[in-house]
Amino acid sequence: MMKRKNSLGFSLVEMAVVLMILGILLNGLLVATGQSTANTRRIDARNQLRQFQEALYGFAQTFGRLPCPAIHTSDGKEEDPGGVGDCFVSHGFLPNSTLNLSGRTNADGLLLDPWGNPYRYSVASVDENNTTDRAFTSTTGLAQLFNDSGTDLVYSAGMLRICGEDVPATAIADCTDGNANVLSDLVPAVILTMGDNWATFTSSEEVANASGGTLGTYSVSNTNDFVNTEYSEENFDDMMIWLSPHILFSKMISAGKLP
């Protein structure tokens, strides 16, 4: 009696199972790769924000003031018609050319974040008498503000303000809520990246940071209030860093720019 030879091929069911397993593995690999890319971009952005913060402190130590924001037509330079901190706007873009920062720029000369969107930059509009003439971008105004207030600098409508979750945490504060969790209300300047969803941001938290104003085709803030809270892929992927007036004053004193 002849023995039956073993089949050397695969059945359709076996091939389907193999393809299904390969598909699952490939999908998992793509998800992991995408997540790794997103995490890398956020790490890069965080490191860049810290570098920009140091560049702003260094600029103040050198010139006795903070730079004005750039605008969409200033080719990455601070928009300062008078050359003495007479800023055209309070809310615009990081003046990368003025700060001599390297990195990828767009056709308007604006420094781009890892997602290809310009970094936003805002400066306080407070003056030496706590009104509206941007003392932090003026050598004389900043010196006068320091002399008038020193370590007793207090919040006024001209200072930038950062808020987090409400207390209790039922929503994100917009800084006007009676339950607002104010993280800082003595902020001279803020640098912001709108994250991956910069072209389609819809959450109220992100709208509070870069909506209401426009420069060319770009959305920018039109208030002195910003929101910073826990990362959420669906609702909040903004990242920001801000200056402390006390560190700013200390660095400028060490550099001989104050008092």
Image (cartoon, rainbow, N blue to C red):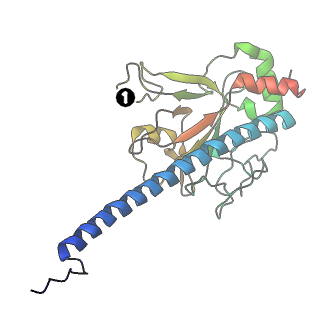
Indicate the amino acid at tag 1.
Ala
Q: Foreground residue, 180 or 79?
A: 180
The answer to whether any part of residue 214 appears in the image is no
Q: Residue at x 51, y 39 (%)?
A: 209
Examine the image and state in which quarter residue 116 appears: bottom right
Residue 99 as seen in the image, left or right of residue 221: right
Q: Residue at x 74, y 31 (%)?
A: 136
User: Outermost residue, top direction?
Assistant: 152
Residue 3 as seen in the image, left or right of residue 121: left
Which corner quadrant holds the N terminus?
bottom left
The answer to whether any part of residue 35 appears in the image is yes
Q: Residue at x 79, y 50 (%)?
A: 100
The spot of residue 85 in percent (x, y) is: 77, 39
Q: Foreground residue, 29 or 238?
A: 29
Q: Foreground residue, 35 or 211?
A: 35
The spot of residue 30 in percent (x, y) is: 42, 60
Which corner quadrant holds the C terminus?
top right
Examine the image and state in which quarter residue 4 appears: bottom left
User: Outermost residue, front direction?
Assistant: 1
Whether residue 75 is situated above or below residue 82 in the rendered picture? below
In terms of secondary structure, where does tag 1 sit?
loop
Residue behind mark 1 = 171
In the rendered picture of this protein, how many numbered marks are placed on residues? Answer: 1
Examine the image and state in which quarter residue 22 appears: bottom left
Residue 147 as seen in the image, left or right of residue 224: right
The spot of residue 61 in percent (x, y) is: 84, 33
Whether residue 257 is situated above or below residue 91 in the rendered picture? above
The spot of residue 240 in percent (x, y) is: 58, 38
Whether residue 39 is situated above or below residue 147 in the rendered picture? below
Q: How crowded is mark 1: few (under 14 residues within 10 Å), some or many (20 or more)?
A: some
User: Outermost residue, bottom direction?
Assistant: 2
Q: Which residue is drawn at 46% across and 56% down?
A: 34
